[in-house]
Image: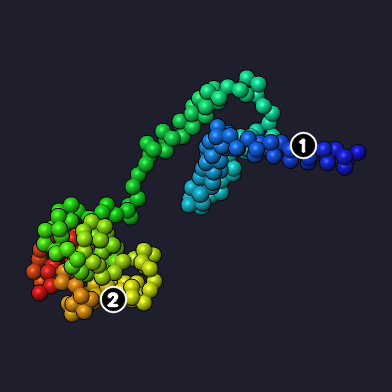
Amino acid sequence: MVIASLYILVRSTRNRIVVRLRRLREPRYLFGAVIGVAYLYFAIFGPRRAASRRGRRSAIPPAATALLAAALFSRRIPQVQGMPLVAAAAVVLFLLPVAVHGYSHWTRPSSARLGLPEKLVFAVHQAVPRGAVVFSDPLTAYELAAFAPVYINAAPTTHVADTRANRPAARVKQAERFFAKHGPVSVVRRAGAHWLLVDRTRDGQAPFRLPRVYSGSRYVLYKIP
């Protein structure tokens, strides 16, 4: 008797799950499922990750557990079934406070880069010939290549194809050694560059004895004679 009851329970649960998964073929159910999964992910794992940063454990929110159980095992609600507009409005009202709270507390990480100054980009366009090589640290050079039609000496290895011609790791090490030792300028010339772009916050405040084309609070562009 017990085995038969367990068999019926397992098969009934399986059939309910299969029926609900088949509903995902309809766009309205698929849309609702995507929103529900996203909400459950942030409701369950968001507090746990925040608590782990503070060195404390966090239990799974009871509301999220109840919502997941209701989605899988509950029966249809006659008052809502067959009324897509009511269901859609309920979803919007349910998620709207979460969206408002999240976007109202949106902050930029302290480590985020704001991009190159417009005055520097303008100076590069005015002074540096098209197709010329600019020597800089990998990250600054990578950003410069997005704003000006120039070649660069190095870029982050994750953004460069690892081929013999590119040698991304060797180029990054070359740039790091150059700025760590503050020269010599012959390294820049061997790289085929006639322009040197320095990020003072990353490469040091000591100036190079070279003609300056642009000088700002953070970046300095030199011309290699």
In the rendered image, is residue 90 in sight?
no
- Residue occupying image coordinates x 29% and y 54%: 113
Mark 1 → mark 2, Cα distance in angstroms: 66 Å
Q: Nearer the viewer, residue 180 or 140?
A: 140
Judge whether 163 appears above or below 12 on screen.
below
Report the amino acid beneath label 1: Ser
Horizontal side of 111 relative to 69 (left or right) equals left
Asked which quadrant contains residue 23, the reply is top right
Q: Which mark is residue 174?
A: 2
Q: Position of residue 86 (x, y in %)?
A: 54, 22
On screen, residue 88 versus residue 10, left or right, reads left
Residue 135 at what x, y percent from top left? 22, 69
Q: Residue furthest top?
A: 79
Q: Which residue is mark 1?
A: 12
Secondary structure state at the residue bearing disc 2:
helix
User: Tag 1, which secondary structure?
Assistant: helix
| Percent coordinates x, y for residue 37 in the rendering | 56, 41
Q: Which corner quadrant holds the N terminus?
A: top right
